[in-house]
Amino acid sequence: MAINQLTTANTFQEWLTATSNLIAVANNLTDNTNGGFIANSSIFVEGAGASLNVRTLANINTLQANTFNLTGNVATMNVSSNGYIGGDLFVYGNVTVSGNITLDAIGFDDLEVSGSANIGQTLVANNANIGSANITILTGAANTAIYNLINGADNQALAFAIALG
């Protein structure tokens, strides 16, 4: 609420009304009377060591910050642009990725897939014992290459059998 300027020309009643209005504003700030304090303006917290500490709840329509440190439990978080995590990320639920995942200079020590794994390009096993893997279905280029090798081995065996009598 706007409080008009007072001068020595104002009456005692005008001074009394203005003082009552100031007391009401102060009470709204300190005691949360009448549902709180509404400011139709910007609030700036600045200066060396300045901080804003909301102890109970803050409903913020748009948050803009140079640095945002988040601790505690967050029920839902939507990031509409990029998210950068400078430390470890622990996920205790499911992860759904609708785009691509790029691994730069990092990888997996162990990868366990309890369902299907569709490999779009090449699966390379370095120092792995593929013979001990329980592979039930092989499709695509790997399947074709294996059957071509088996077919070639069958033909060689037949040729040796004929030659050796």
Image (cartoon, rainbow, N blue to C red):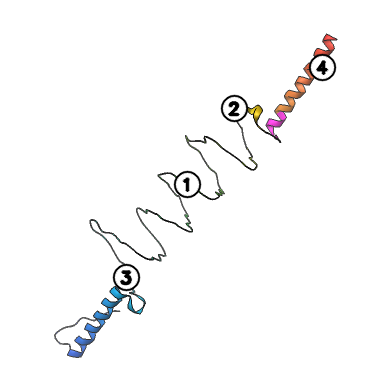
Tell whether label 2 touches label 4 (CB within 8 Å).
no
Identify residue type, mark 1: Phe
How far apart marks 1 and 3 lie (CA) works out to 40 Å
Residue wearing tag 4? 158
**Of callouts 3 and 4, which one flags the residue occurring earlier in the amino acid sequence?**
3
**Of callouts 1 and 4, which one flags the residue occurring earlier in the amino acid sequence?**
1
> Crowdedness of circle 3 by 10 Å Cα count: few (<14), some, many (20+)?
few
In the drawing, what numbered circle is on residue 128? Answer: 2
Residue wearing tag 3? 41
Highlighted range, magenta: 137-144
Identify residue type, mark 2: Ala
Residue shown at the point (79%, 19%) measured from the top left: 155
Q: Is residue 11 visible?
A: no
**Of callouts 1 and 3, which one flags the residue occurring earlier in the amino acid sequence?**
3
Residue shown at the point (58%, 39%) measured from the top left: 112
In the depicted view, which residue is nearer to us: 8 or 135?
135
Q: With 47 as the anchor, is 68 left or right in this view?
A: right
In the depicted view, which residue is nearer to us: 107 or 12?
107
**Of callouts 3 and 2, which one flags the residue occurring earlier in the amino acid sequence?**
3
Residue wearing tag 1? 90
In the drawing, what numbered circle is on residue 69? Answer: none
In the displayed structure, would residue 53 be above or below residue 15?
A: above
Tell whether label 2 touches label 3 (CB within 8 Å).
no
For label 2, the SS is loop
How far apart marks 4 and 2 lie (CA) works out to 32 Å
